[in-house]
Image (spheres, helix red, strand yellow):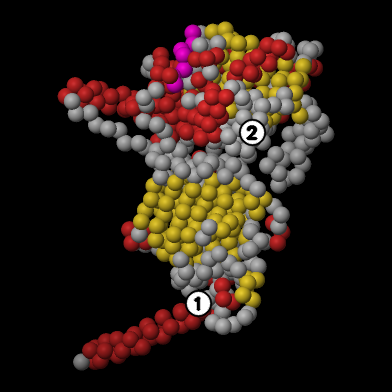
Amino acid sequence: MRRCLMITGMACLLVVLIPCYVSLSFWAQRSISPALLRNRLDPLGRSRETHEAPPAKPLIPTQEIVSALFSKRNFSSSESRSLETWNRFRDLVFRSAPGLPNGAEAVNEAVFAWAELAREIFAEKEKEKEKEKERENGTPKTKENQCPYSIRKMDAAAVNGSSSFKMKIPCGLVQGSSVTVIGTPVGLLGEFKIELVGAALPGDPDPPIVLHVDVRLMGDKHTEEPVIVQNTWTQADDWGDEERCPNPLSEGEKVDGLDKCSGMVGKEETAMATPRVASGSSKQVPFFPFRLRRLAVTTLRVGAEGFQMAVDGKHVSSFAYRERLEPWLVNAVRISGEFRPISVLVGGLPTSEDFEHVVDLASLQSPVLPPRQPLALFVGVVSAANNFKRRMAIRRSWMQYDLVRSGRVAVRFFVGLHKNRLVNEELWNEARSYGDLQLLPFVDYYSLISLKTIAICIYGTEVVVADFVMKTDDDSFVRVDEILDTLTRFNVTQGLLYGRVKVDSEPHRDPDSKWYITQEEWPEEKYPPWAHGPGYVVSGDVAQFVRRWHRSGRRKMFKLEDVSMGIWVAEMAKEGVTVQYVNEERINVEGCEAGYVVAHYQGPRDMLCLWRTLNETHIPTCCAKR
């Protein structure tokens, strides 16, 4: 009896205490500063104040890299053509790559990417045998496109059923891609995060965060006003420097010509524009693009220099890309916190053509070149792995010149590996289909373009033997006939650097500059003459000099690719070679102007339009002024 009374009493006490505890917890949250509440954990679940940067992953031993990247594999002769530069890059991987930012890591990551791709290549060969049987039986299966143009998820909150949402982006992002999130901030604080995340490498517990957008409607420890905080995170470097909006210090700073933080954000407006003030009040309050329990359409766009964020159609902020955190790396969008997503749409994605059903495939395939084929001009195009559309536009435009189709001029794309297996598979299929890709044994990063320039010189002097070697980008339209005619008229066959030549330029010493150069990297006050990267030509002996110097290990790497070529040419002059700099004003480095020989910043549609206009009018006029 006594036990029953005790149990009954405890039950009653719990009935009284539990509601009190819940009530106290609620009022504690209301009374504690939002700044204290919101600074408990970072997006990876760790204390913001105490977490330390994890140690960098050790590099793979040299012998293991050699075995993984350069061991012989049973590839067909057509497959091996895309590895002609790869197989000549063995020494350079160890001598030159570590001298560039992220070079050693890029080789390290390539070991995993190549092993994964190689497994898939040989597995696919087994599948091909099965497909052959299906064709014989008359029941072939259509292969699904692994890199779709767009993906979407409707009623995202209901589908996910939790406080967080994640959607895979199969083949990364490219310039022009966009991520649109439609939803409503909810909860007590209305704090939520939208993140673009990459793929974690084997051994990494968390993936890198390429863009972290943290919306804090109740402010934080720095301010009581609403604020947007943008940042990045990697396993090796931890959190970067956060960028805040509004932020008076960023006034006037731009990315892709757009304000880092729009002047509208934080600017006072009348109370009619916000539900935070009682109806009828004329009180002025700061404008903020997000509001509690109000639907918002947020779009993140991929620009040339960084991400742009717009809310309800209005530009809000820009965020410049950071080293090793480029848009091609993104493989998922992640939403967490006090936010109810309704739908997520990702569009403008890199997508490859269905190679099996390309009607004009034969006219797009590059002629097979015999070993050490003499050429008048070799053109190396620097391209990123998932820039499928740009390469297709070049194949259908200026690669259709008779000079290229006849084999007097050869064009090849130089591409590093991607961290994403699906992208590498599509890249391999593209290489087999068109015969114009040269894969390189490192994962692509912007800081490694100098390695691609060396690869172009190697191909132009060892795989083929070209009188002239040109480097260009996959968003450049090149008038191949006019370039060759101009070189012939100049009649300079040795020591030549032809392009938009820059003289007496100085290194950028501002640490915030994209082109920042330390005193250690370049101690002199000025650079030697150099030509802008969208398109320049060197004579064959210059390309040979670059190849020899880097093979010998004597040449220190420099991360600015176009300046690098100017430095190498200057080194030739020091050895007694007569060099000539030919400035070509018709090489447009900032867009397109009438009379161009090279037009830069041309998208796939622009490329096709320029080619059509050139064929119809025989006059180099522009389609869209940029």
Q: Nearer the viewer, residue 7 or 135?
A: 135
Q: Judge left or right: residue 550 versus residue 581.
A: left
Q: Are marks 1 and 2 in contact (CB under 8 Å)?
A: no
Point out the tag, 1 or 2, that comes first from the N-terminus: 1
Residue at left offset 59%, top offset 58%: 316
Q: Which residues are magenta?
A: 364-370
Q: Which amino acid, mark 1?
A: Gln
Instruction: Tell me residue 460's x, y (percent).
Output: 59, 15
| Label 1 crowd (10 A; few <14 / some 14-19 / many >=20) | some
Dominant secondary structure, magenta: loop
Residue at left offset 42%, top offset 26%: 430
Q: Secondary structure at mark 1?
A: helix
* Residue 13 location, quadrant: bottom left
Q: Secondary structure at mark 2?
A: loop
Residue 189's place in the image compared with 476, above or below, is below
* Residue 244 location, quadrant: bottom right
Q: Judge left or right: residue 178 versus residue 563.
A: left
Instruction: Tell me residue 20's x, y (percent).
Output: 41, 85
Residues at marks 1 and 2, CA–CA distance in whole angstroms: 58 Å
Q: Which amino acid, mark 2?
A: Cys
Position of the C terminus, as image quadrant, is: top right
Residue 366 lies in the magenta stretch: yes
**Residue topped by disc 1:** 29
Residue 592: give its label. Answer: 2
